[in-house]
Amino acid sequence: MITVYFAATNHDWDEFAEDLQNEFAAAGLEANLTRDADPALVDYIVYAPTGWLKDFSPFTRLKGVHSLWAGVEKIVGNETLQVPLARMVDYGLREGMIEYCVGYVLRYHLGMDRDVLRKDAHWDIHIPPLARDRSVTILGLGALGAAVAEALKALNFQVTGWSRRQKDIVGVQCLAGDEGLDSALEAGEIVVLLLPQTPETNNILNAESLAKLPSGACILNPGRGPLIDDDALLAALDSGHIAHATLDVFRVEPLPADHPYWAHPSVTVTPHIASDTRPSSAAKLVADNFRRAEAGKPMLHTVDRSAGY
């Protein structure tokens, strides 16, 4: 019998507990899933940054921690956590992100905002290029970025991807490093940000990098709010160099009511819904990872502390 401590909110417990218990049983794990346990008897922790747990040192028998979030910037630097940490990269999160990104890329590509009969009944014909003639840049080629790149390539878009470390994705031009970033930006008629939040990626879209995008480029950020210098983006939108930005994540959430993004005519705000953790699919991954750990195998999607993700 293993003891699994659930360190998240009451809402998370209501959402995840039943699915976790069912998946533990399906994986052949005899597991006591609890929110009330002696830390010295806990084998694994299911964790969310919104919970109360900050100090992992009392959990002396701990073998692994599984986050319910894809982002780990709020835990990766916690020095009290000395066991493997797995982040959430399940099929529900992946498919949800693909659908969100493909939907908004197609919105920009097809010009959906302009291709509506105006109230004066003016018949304004606009024929967009084919996807094969549209370049899309994806900044970040981790599990989610790679999946989005493959989906867009399957629709015949010219896809360029950039990451800190060199990647290889069939049909996608994969770039890395500072020079690669410049080339990726210069190719980005539509830019999708799917980078993790690290000191190196904060403000990766700033005044200098935004200026390297083609005039009239569109931006989609379902990654992390601090990837964008907000003042620089607003200035680029006001000048017309950037045509539109769809933003799902922000430095402060919920986005404050007086933030300029709300009223800007060239900004679409979505409330951090690009791809949420879905209990049914997330529970399968958690159960599989704890089963692997019990069998002496490494958990999937473990975090590289030195890289920050």
Image (cartoon, rainbow, N blue to C red):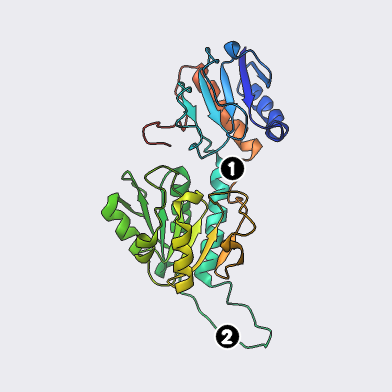
Q: Position of residue 277 (x, y in %)?
A: 61, 40
Judge the density around disc 2: few (<14), some (14-19), many (≥20) Cα neighbours within 10 Å: few
Q: Which residue is mark 2?
A: 124
User: Where 13 sits versus 42, above or below?
Assistant: below
Q: Position of residue 8 (x, y in %)?
A: 64, 30
What is the residue that sits farthest to the left in this orientation? Answer: 179
Compared across the picture, whether 207 is left or right of 57 comes to: left
Q: Which residue is mark 1?
A: 92
Instruction: Determine the CA span between mark 1 and mark 2.
Output: 39 Å
Compared across the picture, whether 262 is left or right of 204 comes to: right
The quadrant in which residue 137 appears is: bottom left
Res. 150 visible in picture: no
User: Where 124 sits versus 69, above or below?
Assistant: below
Q: Secondary structure at mark 2?
A: loop
Q: Position of residue 91 (x, y in %)?
A: 55, 41
Q: Earlier in the sequence, mark 1 or mark 2?
A: 1
Quadrant that contains the N terminus: top right
The structure residue drawn at horizontal position 48% and vertical position 69%, both measured from the top left corner, is 237
* 203, 7: nearer the viewer: 203
* 155, 191: nearer the viewer: 191
**Amino acid type at mark 1:** Gly
User: Where 273 sits versus 2, above or below?
Assistant: below
Q: Position of residue 28 (x, y in %)?
A: 61, 19
* 195, 230: nearer the viewer: 230
Q: How many marks?
A: 2
Res. 17 visible in picture: yes
